[in-house]
Amino acid sequence: MRARPETSPADWLILAMAAYGATLVSRGGDELVVSLPVQSASGVVTTYVLTISAGTAEPRVRETSRQHLPSFCPERHINPGGWFCLAFSQAEPLVVADEDTAVIWWAHVWKFLSLQPLAARRGIWPGEAWAHGDAARHQLRARQAAEALGLLDALQAGSLSVRRHTRGFLRLFEGGRRLYSVWAGPRRTATLRQPCVCGSGRPLRSCSGHATATADLVFEMEAQRAADAAFWADLKGHPCCGTMKACPLAARAPMPMPANTDDSPAACAA
């Protein structure tokens, strides 16, 4: 559907909201307040009052006042100020340019909210998610390399791991099985004559550029791990909402973050 030049993202969101049962509470320019009923996996319906800032092509959304969600929780993909992290923009930009893309945007909001009660109940985020902060860029690149090698399922299942060897190279393991080694200095796979891990039977050096992909996978996995550690280090001193079991902030006493502020480090890549 072609967007009319005079139609703003806020207009498109209003036109598409009925598909998800949302109703407009108020509008002030490009800022919308919307009521959205969401049914969780257990069948419970929760009505969220949301504030949407639609002054750009990628609208932001948060709970208007903290009724059901914490104001900040990286593990539940809630950024400082309560803004929702709906997707990683480099992999899936949520641009609202017409009614169809507005429906897709609402679908992400609905799914995000439908998972929140389950996350709070279990203490873990259900399903796969993008890494926090800059780690998501490396996660995307690792996925691309793993997909080229036929290792994407193993990567997403958490079966791949990188171990550093004292002789100056990194080893990639799937479970307890070593797949290959990569030299840390020249950043290349150590034995290019070995059969490619993609299963083609060809030597790695002559298998569709997979020699580069094997090195990229290892180094992007390592970069993701380092970036994730740096992300949590930057949050040192920030209180935890106390709802997620494995949150690195959970060792600190649970305290609510100030509602609707933007003075904290970004919690995710979107």
Image (cartoon, grey):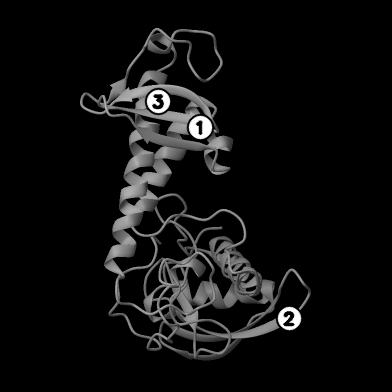
* Residue located at (53% from left, 20% from top): 198
* Residue located at (67% from left, 76% from top): 18
Q: Mark 1 near mark 3, Cβ–Cβ under 8 Å? A: no
* Depth check, front residue: 145 or 14: 145
Provide residue 27's location: percent of width, then percent of height. Answer: 48, 89
Q: Alpha-carbon neighbours of circle 2 within 10 Å: few (<14), some, or many (≥20)?
A: few
Q: Is residue 191 left or right of residue 86?
A: left
Give the residue number, with chain letter if any, for mark 3.
214
* Depth check, front residue: 211 or 17: 211
- Mark 2 lies on a secondary structure that is strand
* Residue located at (50% from left, 78% from top): 242
Q: Is residue 232 left or right of residue 76?
A: left
Give the residue number, with chain letter if any, for mark 2.
45
Q: Mark 2 near mark 1, Cβ–Cβ under 8 Å? A: no
- Mark 3 lies on a secondary structure that is helix
Q: Is residue 29 left or right of residue 151?
A: left
Label 3 vs label 2, nearer the camera: 3
- In the figure, residue 19 lies in which quadrant? bottom right
- In this view of the protein, can residue 7 be seen by the observer? no
Say which amino acid is labelled 3: Thr
Q: Is residue 87 above or below residue 24?
A: above
Q: Earlier in the sequence, mark 3 or mark 2?
A: 2
Residue farthest to the right?
Answer: 43
Say which amino acid is labelled 2: Val
Quadrant showing the N terminus = bottom right
Label 1 vs label 3, nearer the camera: 3
Provide residue 79's location: percent of width, then percent of height. Answer: 41, 73
Say which amino acid is labelled 1: Glu
